[in-house]
Amino acid sequence: MELFDTHFHWEGHLPPELIASEALDNEVKYLVCVGGDYQTSLESLKISHSLENCYFTAGVHPHSAGNEAWDMEKFSELLKDDKCVAIGEIGLDYFYENSEKDVQRKVFNKFCSLGKKTDFPLIVHCRDKDDCCEAYEEVYGILKNEGIGNGKFAVHCYTGNLFWLEKFLDLGAYIGITGIVTFPKAENVRTIVKHIPDDRLLLETDSPYLAPKPHRGKPNFPKHLKFVAEEVAKIKDIPLEKLAKITTHNAFKFYNL
């Protein structure tokens, strides 16, 4: 069995070589190290070249959107690396609003335009305040206006409602599911999983965040992806090995590997 962690962050908790080795010991063979600003995108590039079956993405997380006037030429250079597989993590986060909304929208638009220009898929972060859909509506509108669809973006760590799930799926999204699916109170995410077509489903850890049960509250690592996979397989009522094959195939297709 070969699992694919489509989204993890390296924040120095363990050496990358140990993270990858422990992941492989737990049947997680493929990894994508995701950038959240220029520095972490550059670090992700270096990590991807130090590990077998590891790739990287380059982008600016909405939390970092207000930190500087982003030089898109520097990111364009990162995209030329042969281990770069996507633009991201980009998007809108109106839950924390660590950056002003208009700045988040501006940066997100910039990277969507870069994705359109370079034909790289996008890793999209979308989070809103409870019972609000402003971020979902605006992310959807920007993607649609840019003409980004047909499998060219993934909404990572999706926790929204079924209405916006269907809207994103209709636009051509892949949907990333994390360890939240194992949380006792996350019945909404387990319901969402039932409505994601098999060929649009991606598995991710978003480590070092969102550690699944039984590791909740501790730093997360790619090696814990199997707990996510087991829960999703249970929800979809299919063998774990079949789910691994489906989601790894989806990841290869999405990342053009």
Image: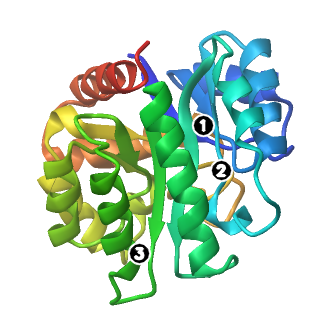
Model colouring:
rainbow
Q: Quadrant of the N terminus?
A: top left
Q: Nearer the viewer, mark 1 or mark 3?
A: 3
Pointer 2 residue: 220
**Image coords of residue 124 (percent x, y):** 46, 52
- Label 1 with label 3: CB-CB less than 8 Å: no
Position of 49 compared to 27: left or right? right
Pick whichever, 146 or 204, lies toward us. 146
**Image coords of residue 189 (percent x, y):** 29, 65
- Mark 3 nearby-residue class (10 Å; few <14, some 14–19, many ≥20): many
Say whether disc 2 or disc 3 marks the residue closer to the N-terminus: 3
- Residue 25 visible here: no
Name the image quarter holding residue 126. Answer: bottom left
Pointer 1 residue: 222
Label 2 amino acid?
A: Asn
Pointer 3 residue: 135
**Image coords of residue 29 (percent x, y):** 53, 18
Which residue corresponds to the image point at 80% horizontal and 28% vertical from the top-left?
16
- Mark 2 nearby-residue class (10 Å; few <14, some 14–19, many ≥20): many
Q: In the image, is residue 170 above or below residue 239? A: below
Label 1 amino acid?
A: Pro
Element under disc 2: loop
Which residue corresponds to the image point at 55% horizontal and 47% vertical from the top-left?
111
Element under disc 3: helix
Position of 245 compared to 45: left or right? left
State how far apart marks 2 and 3 are (Cα). 26 Å
Name the image quarter holding residue 250. Answer: top left
Q: Quadrant of the C terminus?
A: top left
State how far apart marks 2 and 1 are (Cα). 7 Å
Pick whichever, 150 or 250, lies toward us. 150
